[in-house]
Structures are given as structure tokens and as C-alpha cells.
Image (cartoon, coloured by chain):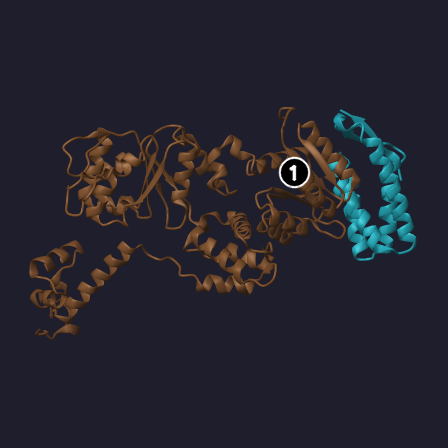
Amino acid sequence: MTTKSNPYRILVVDDDKDILLLLSKWLTDDGFDVVIAASGEEALDRLNIDEPRLVITDLFMGEMSGMDLLARIHAENPLLPVIMLSGNAQIPDAVKATHMGSSAFLTKPVKQAEILDQVKRALRISPERQQQNPIASEIIYKSKPMEELIELAQMVADSDITVFISGATGTGKEILAKAIHKASPRRDHPFVAVNCGAIPEQLLESELFGHEKGAFTGANQKHEGLFKSADKGTLFLDEIGDMPLSLQVKLLRVLQDLEVRPVGSTRSYPIDVRIISATHRDLDAVVKEGEFREDLYYRLKVVPLHMLSLAERREDIPLLAGHFLQKHHNIGSKKQKHFSPDAMDYMIQAPWPGNVRQLINVVDLCATLSRTETITLNLVQHALQDEPCNLQTLKDAKQEFERNYLISVLKITNGHVANAAKIAGKNRTEFYKLLGQHNIDTADFRSEKNPLTSKNLNV
Amino acid sequence: MSNSKIPVTIDIDLEDLIPGFLTNRGKDLGTLRNALECSDFPVMQSIGHSLKGVGGGYGFDRMSEIGAAIENAARIKNVEQLKELIENYSDYLTRVEVRFE
């Protein structure tokens, strides 16, 4: 039994009066505040009046079924947990209800312990959970692996401990970092994010540490830098795996000494900043390849958190899709729309290489293009096929292009470095340097190894 | 059929609800008999479904079993089986003896 002062209000919907009485009795005895409705229509009326934190509904009722009620509830409030009860344990119904976002599907006759267990489990995913776990209010989920991740994030939020977030592109690493900041004692101070892979090496140093006036050509005025901007707050170093080696040394020194020296300055100043870093790259492999300093890696990776791909948290898809639809509606869409069951089913099973970011794009596209309130399977399929999936970062794309280009030139010149360098518009030293960076051996392209390209090219 | 009582142990917390619950189940019996007379299979299926769902929740597991059997028999319109099941249900209601713990 829980405490008798449980603050949660639960709406129970069933057209059987004895079931209503029984569930009310069990829930009330356990400290819950219970309101009842004898039909789906009455339940919808009660929702706005009573504002329950959870709904328990029968599947088969009069005109409006429990499934219809679930769809209507989640069209308005996708985060409100709904538990379905059914006298007929039909697996397709249970699957459909789960896909539509129900928290649990129970078969009648239901036992007291079973319903109370499911109610308590479902309430952990309700909006109320933010009171117990502030991070949970920032991130939409109901899956067990995400619950474990959020619990871990909540545990580290209170301290100043350095957090490292790994995970594929589009999984929401920055959202998690922001949520940790908001749940931390630093929440009233700035959260500053910088993408280390998007800023040229020369600029990144002054961007991070600041510079003095006249420190370099174009430094017309003093710049404080992001460490200073994030004073007493959190600095989020996104795509840390793309940070140039030369800067990694300087960052390591800053983290060790807790002092920053702006470019062109002779003086350092102390910093009070929490560091959260993230990357989509396999940093263990990058360290092994020598592209990332091992000492910095371990300095950053005090608490590693891994953001799951959308495919690893498929049960969150209905909840997320409902949330993004609601957001789309809130920013100006006239009609509240919802996905048809087969469209939702398709989305749950889709590969989602672009993760949550791709899901947002698909939901927005569908909500914009759908002429009816129900978004069809065809439209979802169209949106998913049109989605430019799994895009590389610009840096990765450039690296890949550069490597393929060097290989092409060496093939054409049969591994003749002077000719290849001439085509590439580089001197031989620069060209050798590029080959070294990409670990390319010119011997692999000479005629005896590469009979297909045996003719030298005179340029 | 035997005249011996069928003891059923019910959670004492439900004591207040049981008289009303059993009155409603008696009404269900009347509805079932009328529906059987009129061969109203949807009504018998619905009552069977309801008994199945509600009986075990209150602690009357046998009631849920009979309800499920009535629901199935009504679905396939097996009149002979329905007659037997409805009498079984009547017998159960007559002999059931509730003990609260």
C-alpha cells in the first residue's frame, strides 16, 4: 500500500457499474483520487473538468470504444497515460493499443495488485514525474532503457561532474545536455553550446578561450570567449570528436588548471564552468587512431551517457509522434491531426536512420501535407522515402571526398606522386602530407599492383 | 445438483460492495433466462462477457469461468450448452457462501 495522501487523480471509464465500483474502491483505498465515467463521451467531458493524471478505460463500451477514447485523449494530451482493460485478450487489440500509446493493456478479470502495479508504473511517465525528476520533464519517453538513462542523468545533474554523451546524429544529445543543466544547481546561469566540428580550427580557439584586441589579423576588439560566457553555467562541447588535436592540448590544460588564457594574452583567469561534451563518433576508435588525445578523453568521460537511437526505443515513437503533432498544432495548424493506426504501425517499424530529428521532420511534413485530420499510411511512406536520411557531418563528408579524390588521382597517374600532385594543384610535400593523413600508400597504385591503370599520365 | 454451499473467500475491504454486486448478478440471471427464451444471443454474449470480466475481480473466479463459457456458447449459438450453463450459473448463485477475510 502507498501513502494515503497520494496526490494523483485517476479517471476510470467503464460501462459496467460493478467494475467502476471495484476499481474505485481499490484505487481510493490506495490513496488515489478517483473520478468515474460510464462512457467514452462522458470521459472526454470529465477530462477538462477533472484533469486526471491517468485514465483507465475498458476497451469495449457503447458507441465510443476504449481505442477511440485513447486516440481522442492522445490527440489532446499525448503525455497522459492510459491503461486499457479488456475482457477479451486479443493480441491484435493489445498490439494496436500499445502502438497507439497506451501504457498497459490488462485482461479482465483484473487483480488488485496487477492494476495498482500498472497504475504506479504508468504514473512515472506522466507529467507529474517532473516533480520527482526534472530531466524527465524535458525529454519525451516511456521506454525502460530511456527511463534508466534519465535516472542516471538525474543522479549526475546535481553535481559538477563532467558528463560525456555519446550517440548517433539526431538522437537528442544536446537536449539531454540542456536537461542536465536545467536540473543542476547551475540552472540560473547560462547554458552555452558550441559545435567543435563546425568552426574552423583557427577560429575555434579564440571562440572558446577569447582573444585580446590585436591578437591576430582581424581581431579588432577583445572577445571574451565561450568559457567566459558560460561562467557559473554549463559549456556544452558538441562534436568534441572533431576538435583538432592542437586545440585538444589547450582544452586539456584548461580542464586541469581550471584557468583560461585568451589568445594574445599573457594572463589567465579562473573559470567556473561545468563541461558536458558529446560526439556521434566512436571516440574509443578515434583515440586508437591517434586523432583524439587519450588523456583528454578520460578527462571528459567521467560519466558516460549513451543516447539511444530511435530504433532502440521504438515504444517511444507513438508518444514522440503525438508530442510533435501537438507542437505542430500549437504553432498554427488549424486542425488537430492524428496518425491512422496503420500509419503509426509503419512508423514504429521504420528504420529511422536520422533518429528523432528525422521523426520531427516526418511528423511536420505529414501534418502540413495532410488534408484530413487523419494522417494516412501513404503520406507517412511518402514522407519517409523523401527524407534525406543519415547525412554525414560536413567534416566527415569532406574527409571522405578528399580520400576518394586522392585515390582517383593516384589511380589515374598510376601512383606517380609528382603527376598526381600536379593534377591536385599541390606541391609534392603537401600531397605527401595529405596521403599520410589518409594513410594511403602510393605503392598500391603502381602498375604491377594495379594492372587496370597501367598507363602513366603526362601532365 | 448438490445443495452444499460453495465457499468463496472475499477481501474484507470489499464487504460493503458485495451485497449490491450479488443483487446485480441475480438480475443478470433473470436477463439471461429471458434472452434464452427469445434466443437473443447478443444479449447472452454481452452478459457472459460482463460476468467474465467482473466476477474474478471481486473474487468469484468460478463466476468468471461460467461467464466466459456463456459468452462462447452465445457466440456460436449453442442453445443446449447455454441452457446448461445458465442453470449452472443459477446453481452457483444459490449455493455461493461468502466469507470475508
Judge from the rendering whether residue A386 lies leftward or rightward of residue A237; answer left or right.
Answer: right
Does residue A307 show up? yes
> Where in the figure is residue A294, as x and y percent of width and height?
22, 39
Q: Residues within 10 Å of mark 1 (few under 14, many from 20)?
A: few
Callout 1: residue from which chain?
Answer: A
Chain assigned cyan? B
Q: What residue appears at the point 23 percent right and 37 percent down from the top-left corner?
A: A296
Judge from the rendering whether residue A324 lies leftward or rightward of residue A198; answer left or right.
Answer: right
The residue pinned by badge 1 equals A51
> Where in the figure is residue A6, as x and y percent of width and height?
63, 27
Judge from the rendering whether residue A126 lies leftward or rightward of residue A260; answer left or right.
Answer: right
> Where A314 falls versus A138 (above or below)?
below
Q: Quadrant of the N terminus of chain A?
A: top right
Q: Quadrant of the C terminus of chain A?
A: bottom left
> Where in the figure is residue A106, as x and y percent of width and height?
65, 43
The quadrant where residue A50 appears: top right
Does residue B61 show up? no
Front position in the image: A64 or B5:
A64
Q: What residue appears at the point 77 percent right and 44 percent down from the top-left corner?
A: A15
Front position in the image: B38 or B87:
B38
Residue at the extreme front: A220
Front position in the image: A404 or A215:
A215
Q: Amino acid at mark 1?
A: Glu
Front position in the image: A347 or A11:
A11
Colour in which the image shows chain A: brown
